[in-house]
Image (cartoon, rainbow, N blue to C red):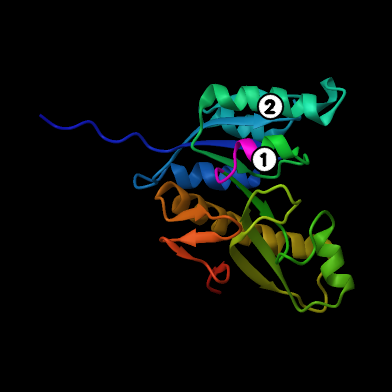
């Protein structure tokens, strides 16, 4: 008699907008060897196209509209209650444009990833492409990190670089960075589902060893 297969790790994605990184994750998860399953997509914007992407992929969705709450604490408590219904192994923030409270982040410590369009620790927060251009940088990129209480300050797992050229604009730079995001995020989610990455006290463990520097996506 054949033994039951071990269930795949359950992934819940939170998004706020068009969901291009969500789509990259959906596409990757359709591979026969992908080690995780996207079980739900949550959103704080009722009209976000990310919800349509999930529906087209037959993934369950839910909305917790932040405008319906008087405080960030109340919103986060409602969002947490929705997430706990699914009991995910991993929460992936894919363009989720809300600053999460300390209690929320602590509740899911080591189980929540975020993607940020800069080479952290440079340019936390918004307008990263414009800020990189104004600083005269020659290299920009994307970082994926564990979520901790510090905004965009959790230990970085992996990064990918793009070259800044003389005629780049914030829009052209955003396009180049986003192309790297769509490659890198599924790779890191795969690592998590395979058990290759964990969050230590304030560092990343990769294959059981402390990661001294972020993994890099090779240029090609």
- Name the element at disc 2: helix
Image spot of residue 73 (x, y percent): 79, 29
Q: Is residue 186 left or right of residue 167?
A: left
Q: Is residue 129 above or below residue 1?
A: below
Q: Nearer the viewer, residue 123 or 151?
A: 151
Residue depicted at x 78% and y 41%:
99
Q: Is residue 192 left or right of residue 15?
A: left
Name the residue carrying label 1.
105
Image spot of residue 131 (x, y percent): 86, 66
Query: If you read the primary sequence from the N terminus, does the residue marked by circle 1 or circle 2 appear first?
Result: 2
Do the numbered discs 1 and 2 sit on residues whose CB atoms are within 8 Å?
no
Q: Quadrant of residue 100?
A: top right
> Any magenta on residue 25?
no
Name the residue carrying label 2.
79
Nearer to us: label 1 or label 2: 1
> Any magenta on residue 110?
yes
Which stretch appears magenta?
105-111
Q: Quadrant of residue 213?
A: bottom right
Residue depicted at x 50% and y 65%:
210
């Amino acid at each position: 008699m054949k033994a039951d297969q071990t269930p795949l790790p359950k992934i819940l994605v939170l998004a706020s907008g068009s969901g291009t990184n969500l789509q990259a994750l959906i596409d990757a998860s359709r591979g026969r060897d992908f080690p995780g399953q996207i079980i739900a997509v949550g959103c704080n914007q009722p009209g976000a196209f990310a919800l349509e992407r999930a529906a087209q992929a037959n993934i369950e969705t839910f909305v917790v509209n932040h405008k319906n709450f008087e405080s960030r604490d109340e919103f986060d408590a409602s969002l947490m209650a929705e997430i706990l219904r699914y009991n995910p192994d991993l929460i992936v923030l894919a363009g989720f444009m809300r600053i999460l409270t300390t209690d929320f982040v602590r509740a899911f410590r080591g189980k929540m990833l975020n993607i940020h369009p800069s080479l952290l620790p440079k340019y936390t927060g918004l307008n990263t492409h414009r800020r990189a251009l104004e600083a005269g940088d020659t290299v920009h990129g994307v970082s994926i990190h564990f979520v901790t209480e510090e905004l965009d300050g959790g230990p970085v797992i992996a990064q990918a670089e793009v070259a800044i050229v003389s005629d780049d604009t914030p829009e052209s730079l955003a396009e180049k960075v986003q192309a790297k995001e769509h490659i890198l995020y599924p790779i890191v989610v795969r690592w998590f589902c395979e058990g290759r990455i964990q969050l230590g006290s304030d560092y990343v463990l990769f294959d059981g060893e402390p990661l001294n520097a972020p993994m890099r996506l090779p240029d090609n």
